[in-house]
Image (cartoon, coloured by chain):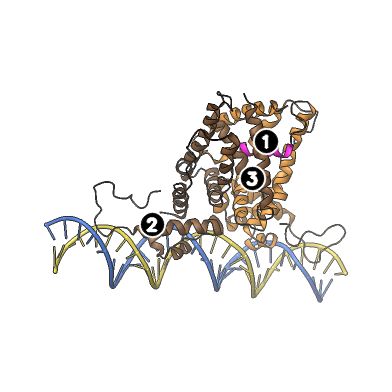
Chain colours: A orange, B brown, C blue, D yellow
Amino acid sequence: MAPGTGPPVGVQRAPGRPRDRQADDAILAAARELLVEVGFERLTVTDVAARAGVGRPTVYRRYASKEELVAASVEALRSDEPAPDTGTLGGDLRAELLPRASALRHPLLLQFLAVLLVSNAQGSEFAATYWRDAIAQRRAAFGEIFLRAQARGELAPDADPDLLTDVVAGAFTYQALRPAAVETEAIEARVERLLDLLCALLQRLQ
Amino acid sequence: MAPGTGPPVGVQRAPGRPRDRQADDAILAAARELLVEVGFERLTVTDVAARAGVGRPTVYRRYASKEELVAASVEALRSDEPAPDTGTLGGDLRAELLPRASALRHPLLLQFLAVLLVSNAQGSEFAATYWRDAIAQRRAAFGEIFLRAQARGELAPDADPDLLTDVVAGAFTYQALRPAAVETEAIEARVERLLDLLCALLQRLQ
DNA sequence: ACTATACGTGACAGTCCGTAACGGATACCC
DNA sequence: GGGTATCCGTTACGGACTGTCACGTATAGT
């Protein structure tokens, strides 16, 4: 997962020429762009290297496989995402869930979920790492939304935020299975209706 | 999607040697088995042909691509699934949802969902066909469960069964993203708790 | 200077996809 | 039976991708 054998931590300094940190970023950016453009399966390491202006061995020096490269590129994106609105106590539940609904249908995340689904179903070693590095933190942000709603009295205090996350995140993620190319705006409307239904369900749970 | 240019319908009879129907079944069975064993990406047409005891061109004579082969193998599985319990009015909602929860986490279906997710995110032409052939009918069975629950008075009659399907199917499908290899029995328990929560949510919607 | 590593280029073996060519087999029609 | 059209299995091919290696060169610390 980490580039190579890991960066030299703290005072310790590796001998020889250091890694080009500019290449690090270029590789991750190129991987993200191509993942969105052509998908995981048609993404090639050759193309990533070319777009990053880098030789292919330079990519493999950092990531042992195409899977690790993709996982790292998605994980790096998380720090670029907007902060989960940790201002006041926030508005109502619906207003807080809406931006998360669209974030869950981000093309990059969906491509990654597909990788996760596949490596999962066959018990790949990557599955657990993927979950821990890329999904768990996003789920935590979801759980805090429900905690805030409970603090505001919008939600029953004994409801498990983790299970609620499964329900809400599952419903939104599920929308990505629909043939989006044909009716991308119809799905937007459907998400709105879904959001209404979920809020009605949750707020009746008091 | 259909094998070759389609089978001769009705009285019409194609000239020349007919297709080996035994090979048809062997190919689909081999594809299903390998899809579960190694996943979509590591499934090769060469292996499918070998397991089916068939030459590789014999596979390509029926399906234009690996994607079509996989889609057909999943679609063929649907007819093997148990009938959706169209007996009396059924038991309660929870009892009807339970078998569907495990059906949604069938390894074969999950592999297929991953294919759908990928081809979807990049606007593949297959996406719409996949949805229509393999998903839409399963969703219909789900909708009927909610219709029966409404007939029994367990559910508000104005609730949209289609949206409810999104919520329930989404929650269960989402579980497949968890690292299953490590804790396969923990997920079983989680599905039980999730089922309890969903029933509590739905039945409060009156 | 010396060492150790990174870089780019180019090449390589191995695998897979999808297609084509061949000889033989099997159905229908005259 | 002869003719025709399609199937089958085998074998081979071009193209693409993966992951690795070797080479010469560049860049850091000692």
Q: Decide whether the magenta segment is chiefly helix, strand or loop.
A: helix
B93, B66: nearer the viewer: B93
Q: What crowding class fits label 1: few (fewer than 14 Cα within 10 Å), some (14-19), or many (20 or more)?
A: some
* Chain label for disc 3: B
The kind of residue tagged 1 is: Leu
Quick one: label 2, few (<14), some, or many (20+) residues within 10 Å? some
Quadrant containing the N terminus of chain A in the rendered view = bottom right
The answer to whether residue A167 is magenta is: yes
Residue at the image point whose x is 61% and y is 51% from the top:
A115
Label 3 with label 2: CB-CB less than 8 Å? no
- Label of residue B24 in the image: 2
Question: In the image, residue B122 lies at what x, y percent?
Answer: 53, 44
Distance of label 3 from label 2 (alpha carbons)? 33 Å
User: Label 2 sits on what residue type?
Assistant: Asp
> What chain does mark 1 sit on?
B
Q: Earlier in the sequence, mark 1 or mark 3?
A: 3
Q: Would you say A188 lies left or right of A126 here?
A: left
Residue B179 visible in the picture: no
The residue under label 3 is B175
Subunit of label 2: B
Which amino acid is tagged 3?
Gln
Residue C1 in the image: above or below residue B59: below
Badge 1 is on which residue? Answer: B197
Snapshot quadrant of residue B22: bottom left
Q: Is residue B183 visible?
A: yes
User: Which region is colored magenta?
Assistant: A160-171
Query: Alpha carbon of mark 1 to alpha carbon of mark 2: how far?
Result: 44 Å
Q: Earlier in the sequence, mark 1 or mark 2?
A: 2
Q: Mark 3 or mark 2, which has the lower sequence index?
A: 2
